[in-house]
Amino acid sequence: MNKLFSPFIIHRPFRNINFTLGFLITITLLFTAILSLIYTPYDPNRMNLSKRFLPPNAEHWLGTDQYGRDILSRVMRGAVNSIVVGLVAVSIGMGFGVFLGSLAAFYRKWVDEIIMRISDVLYGFPAVLSAILITSIFGPGIINSMMAIGIFNIPIFARLTRATSLSIWERDYVTAARAIGRRNTGIIWKYILPNILSALIVQGTVQFAIAILAEAGLSYLGLGTQPPHPSWGRMLNEAQTFMGISPYLAIFPGCAIALTVLGLNLLGDGLRDMMDPKLSRIQIRI
Amino acid sequence: MTAYLLKRSLTLLITLILVSIVIFAVLMVLPGDPAQIILGIHATPESLQNLRRQLGLNQPILTQYLNYMRGFFTGDLGHSITYEVSVISLILQRLQVTIPLTILSILFAIFLSIPSGIYASLHRNRPGDYGVMILSQIGLAVPAFWAGILLILLFAVTLHWFPAGGFQSWQSHPMGALKSLLLPALSLGFVRAAVLARMTRSSMLEVLGEDFIRTARSKGLPRRRVVYKHAFRNAIIPVITLIGLQTGDLLAGAIIIENVFHLPGVGRLVFEAIGQRDLPVIQGVVLLIATMIVVVNFLVDLAYRYLDPRIRYE
């Protein structure tokens, strides 16, 4: 079996600085999210009105908010929210996108034309716009915003899958497989998908980062995660009201978003460099 | 060329019709009766029936869609439920904030990104290049609305140089209006600049490696002339395309940024309309933004072919 570039044969990955940094940041984020489900310094939603607007101190490392809730605990729990949104949104996008892109590349002609035209329409719709449309109908909430971000991801993966698999269908080993009578679904599973997997993984990390940014934006607008659940975007919205009294409130959740997105972007860059130096990243959309 | 233009225009028209159907269909499946939402739960059956007739809700869906599209092309997008004025006049009024904001942020992005991208490409793998690349990684990671909040914290809350939000009208205070758009445009532009700087750098690097650059240098042209006259002119084409393709993201970013700075633009309008379930406004704004994105992409495509004659009109 011919694999052009497999994600499983990376040699000495930690020699790549982007990958190393991105990997460390992402692993820390994952660890923090899992840890926050078992342990946070305080209950992220417990109010304590006698300890409002405390600056960072020995007891509350990142200070407290307008209800006296511990910021560190809320930032930690907010990580779970971001990861879940990112995972679900990318899974929706990748699942439907890969399916549609494979269909387009396999059938070509009018199937290809229809799928690509529809994906053009969706492609013109930024995540925030489709989320506004969806939340205006079904109401604000985390499920609806995940769906909206996921739908926005579909055309990106559909285009990538179509573009990368088209050339693989032309390869000699695929022709050989067809000649010995392999079934088309078998060819897609055994030859096409493994060869486009690395491109999908790279794009997946990038879209994961974009999904986190989009969710933060939606939650900031009040369309995403609903209170009292801690979400980084929502925390920034609340912080803006009290910025004059306590500027710390506006700093830490933003740092958490930026660091997470930075980590995922670096990871994506590093993976891309290692898997295929020629593979260029699709346009970045935030 | 004419054949290509015709083909492209036809695709544009089909895309626009698809977009409008999607938006119309999505708002059609809305749970609840729009007339009930407008009049509230205490409305009498007669008044509900009257309003339904007035809004055309008792007609078949296809007729409703055709009526809506006829309205769209004649500049009539219906009436806002909350503001009780026509949606188009409301949008036009709010565009006075959104369009200058978008243009200013594109200008910021261009002035920040293109010189730094060129600089990075000419100093490849040296500290200057790393500096630009690190800054652009940060720019990609920072959400525009958080950049906005930080700018408010620094320039409005701490230094008192700029207003923390709000907008003065162009007619009465043109300078005040411009001043209230500067921070929002900067926060939007910074993020865009990160993407453009990377694109400028990689595009310049690609062109600088081409044979005609070596030829230009070897025939004795000064380095400056080769960089700006030969390399830059060719490298800028994909960058211009990217600027155009980013319109959608910019408009989406403007929706959030207008809310950060309390600017009365289209983004704030659609956000308020969601809160008040003012459907004609939501429908109008989303359709308008989608149309703008599709049309700009079309123009970018044409400009691309004009700027780079090597691309054939198929």
Image (cartoon, helix red, strand yellow):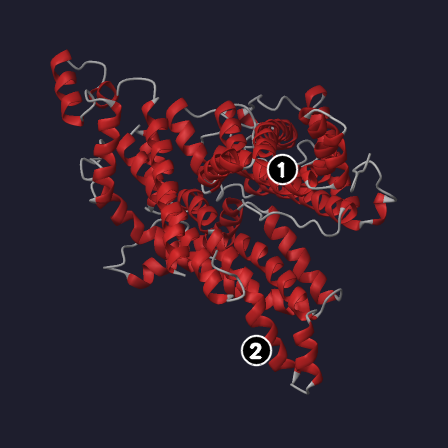
Residue B244 appears in view? yes
Q: Which residue is mark 2?
A: B229
Q: Quick one: SS at disc 1? A: helix
Residues indicated by labels 1 and 2 sit on the same polypeptide chain? no
How many numbered marks does the figure carry?
A: 2
Q: Position of residue B93 (x, y in %)?
A: 25, 49
- Identify the subunit bearing mark 1: A
- Residue at 28% x, 36% y: name it: B281
Image location of residue A250, percent across then percent down: 55, 41
Q: Amino acid at mark 1?
A: Thr
Quadrant of the rendering where the N terminus of chain B is positioned: bottom left
B53 up-or-down from B245: above or below: above
The residue positioned 77% from the left and 37% from the top of the image is: A173
Check the residue under mark 2 and report the chain it is in: B
Horizontal and vertical percent position of residue A63:
62, 35
Name the residue furthest right.
A12
Q: Is residue A227 visible?
A: no
Of B216 and B196, nearer the camera is B216
Q: Nearer the viewer, residue B305 or B285?
A: B305
Q: Position of residue B224 (x, y in %)?
A: 62, 81
Amino acid type assigned to the residue bearing label 2 in the image = Lys
* Residue indicated by mark 1: A161
Look at the numbered disc 2 and give the secondary structure of its residue: helix
User: Residue at (60%, 49%) from the top-left corner?
Assistant: B140
